Image (spheres, helix red, strand yellow):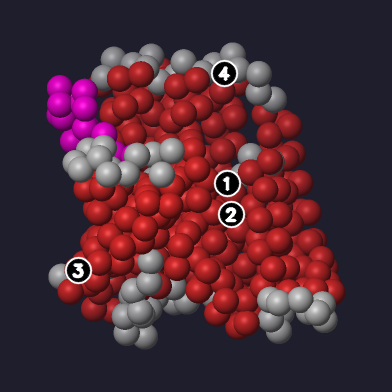
Amino acid sequence: MLIFDLAIILLASKLAGDVSVKLRQPAVLGKLLIGIILGPAVLGLITATDVLEELSQIGVILLMFLAGLETDADEFKRTGKASSFVGIAGIALPLALGYGAGMLMDLPPLESIFLGLLLSATSVSISVQALKEMGRLKSREGTTILGAAVIDDVLVIIALAFVMSLAGGDVNLGVVILKKVAFFAIGILAAWKLVPLVLRLFAPLRVTESVVSAALILCFAFAYMAEYTGVAAIIGGYMAGVAISFTGYRHEVTEKIETISYAVFVPVFFTSIGVKVEFAGISSQLGLIAGLTVVAVVSKLVGSAIGAKAAGFGWRGALGIGAAMVSRGEVALIIAAIGQEAGLLQPDLFAVLVVVVLLTTIVTPPMMKWFFGDQADGGQEKAEA
């Protein structure tokens, strides 16, 4: 029953987060691990359902929306070069090593390329929360990570369309690129002209929380438009947050959305990641899982760090940025599902990669803590999730 599931998730996630902080780890790590304990892998109290998945999707969109609200626009402009270096280098090395791993596994060349492409994906939703807890979301490193994630998402989706066209799928690469360009062109125009107008129109309405409702409408509209054009919904949510951050309603929206998000939706998102873990049937694949996990972690960590170092960061900061890019999250899971449907991933390899993706997500927060922990520029923020 959904109501019971929510009660268990909220109770367990808050307690697990507190324990994680007491152990000097990011609170988000506790949320991820408690999901595994609650899910089918251990206790079986919570199962992955469509409704839980939808609530989780709302949670990650709101999390990225908040990241957009807290983005320093001036810092974002200054880190454009660094974000580009990190995004591109963070794709190149995983793509190359993933392809090499596929060839060693005797996969056909196209399937090997797809494996490399899947390992090139990044989802920084987990990293965003870890950055918030460490007080580094608005830092130069944090802004670079967010910008690199946008670049990574766009390049990987375009490359995916190219691979799918080679595989004989009904994919027109020109149309795919045009849709991405259209999203960013329309999105930027809407952020500039439409977002302030909508907020001003809603502000005088004689109903409760009209401005916050308008902000949520914009957030979900941007997220839908992004998903419709093949860009991840979280990028749309992030763009809406950045747009509102330029208005006078920024602080009001941030305060209210944080309450809504961290009370219900964000804990569901973090916990649901762990709930998806299932160990049945993979005991014979542990060696492959370990090998691909090492490739996934090292390739993204080193590739992104090289890009950050080339952009002028010191090695510790560069490795911290690389660590934040390691989580593949829901973006890689979506790509894996597309690959399985297109016949580019066999069912047994699909199951292995789901576990690999989840492992990259779990190891990301402690890695970030290791590289960023003693550099926190604002002290540890309240661990909310």
Q: Earlier in the sequence, mark 2 or mark 3?
A: 3
Q: Are marks 1 and 2 in contact (CB under 8 Å)?
A: yes
Mark 4 or 1 closer to N-term?
Answer: 4
Coordinates of residue 23 in the picture (x, y in percent): 15, 70
The residue positioned 32% from the left and 44% from the top of the image is 46
Q: Is residue 144 above or below residue 115?
A: below
Q: Nearer the viewer, residue 47 or 102?
A: 47
| Contact (Cβ within 8 Å) of mark 2 with mark 3 | no
In this rendering, does residue 220 appear at all? yes
Q: Per the image, is 282 magenta?
A: yes
Q: Answer with mark 1 or mark 3, whichever residue precedes in sequence.
A: 3
Q: Amino acid at mark 1?
A: Ala
SS for callout 3: helix
Q: Give, as a single range, the part of the protein colored magenta.
A: 275-293
**Which type of secondary structure does the marked residue at label 4 adopt?**
helix
Say which mark, if any, is on residue 232: 1
* Closer to the camera in the image, 354 or 42: 42
